[in-house]
Image (tube, rainbow, N blue to C red):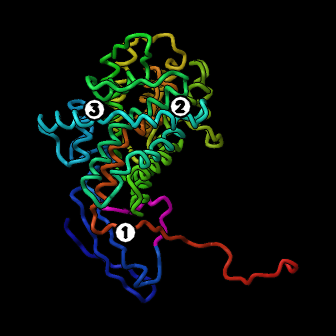
Amino acid sequence: MSAKSGSFKIGDTTVDMPVKSGTIGPDVIDIGKLYNETGCFTFDPGFLSTAACESKITYIDGDEGILLHRGYPIEQLADHGDFLETCYLLLYGELPTSAQKAEFDYTVTRHTMVHDQMSRFFQGFRRDAHPMAVMVGAVGALAAFYHDSTDINDPTQRMIASIRMVAKMPTLAAMAYKYNIGQPFVYPKNDLDYASNFLRMCFAVPCEDYKVNPVLARALDRIFTLHADHEQNASTSTVRLAGSTGANPFACIAAGIAALWGPAHGGANEICLKMLMEIGTVDRIPHFIARAKDKNDPFRLMGFGHRVYKNFDPRAKIMHKTCHEVLAELGIKDDPLLDVAMELERIALSDPYFVERKLYPNVDFYSGITLKAMGFPTTMFTALFAVARTVGWIAQWTEMIGDPHQKIGRPRQLYTGAPHRDYPPIGKR
């Protein structure tokens, strides 16, 4: 990483600050000494212009529509590999050899079961609890069941915890789903791949055989791959912030799940489907398009455009293809909701209003349609996102633990409250 230099002047004080360059991407100004030398902080709501860490895991160029994991384009990983290969890449830094891939798959597969007492843990929740509420509690509780892998200073324990969470997250998500719909839990099977195992745990019942549809399994595997990591987003930053305190990895991931739950983040595809339900039928679309174009109307079309990607979301191109493969495989032709989605897609790709503003359908739009077609209720969408993103959180957490420059997170503030005042007796207020 090359270093440049720059200066910053406040009043009569000039501060020399190094300008650091990464392998790709914009330079960053190191302001670590700014307060000590000037008495001033920076003000950056949302941290939109602040690099909070140094990372070698994921790179995003939103203007060009580029997403790289360890240097590899997401398109290549999704088309030529599978989710567990991407997991290995994120965790270890390089793509696995055939032998390494086989060993990694074997290890993850044989850690998919959870402690039997976890099944009783679920009974403490209401049947109608949102799966994400259950996931936050269940993942946080893993520290009580697997306390032999909570020492963050032990590299071996850190890797055991990492494997356990990647392996057990789909089992917990499937259990949350089964509990919600009142069906018995289905144990994982070691002869199935990651995505197929999850589909079986969600949709199989003890009274009949369940055969995994390979098209749906491949589609779900792609969804997992596309959501594996996304640089320093809100939930990943939450995991890093929690981890900076020395909290155990299960607690950190539970914090990430809580952050992911927000409708502006991981809950976006669920909100997108709710919007489609609100529109209802194709003939009502013009009314909602007009509302979306009206500056004075608070209504927004969800699932279009992206905060980071100002051109196109590279994941959306892959999900577009995958979505239509699933719809064709299932022969879905008479679903009003999907009719609305397909017409909105056509409009967004042709209407000058959307094209000029680059409001293209994003990954949430296509993944929501795909998951609904596969049979998942909207309440499960964010839980599936959490299953996929767990490996990214773990990779980022592991990197943070090993960073010699890492400090406990402590953002500053611009205080605008009352200045110092003395406490008055209650009778004089």
Q: Is residue 271 visible?
A: no
Which structural element holds mark 1?
Answer: loop
Label 1, label 2: how far apart the Cα atoms are: 36 Å
Residue 111 image offset from top left, x and y in percent: 30, 36
> Vertical placement of 147 versus 361: above or below?
below
**Crowd rating for badge 1 (residues with CA inside 10 Å; few <14, some 14–19, many 20+):** few
Answer with mark 2 or mark 3, whichever residue precedes in sequence.
3
Looking at the image, which is closer to me, 104 or 289? 104
Q: Amino acid at mark 3?
A: Thr
Which numbered dot is residue 379? 2
Residue 379 image offset from top left, x and y in percent: 53, 31
**Crowd rating for badge 2 (residues with CA inside 10 Å; few <14, some 14–19, many 20+):** some
Which numbered dot is residue 109? 3
Residue at image coords 45%, 37%:
117
Answer with mark 1 or mark 2, whichever residue precedes in sequence.
2
Q: According to the image, label 1 marks what residue?
A: 407
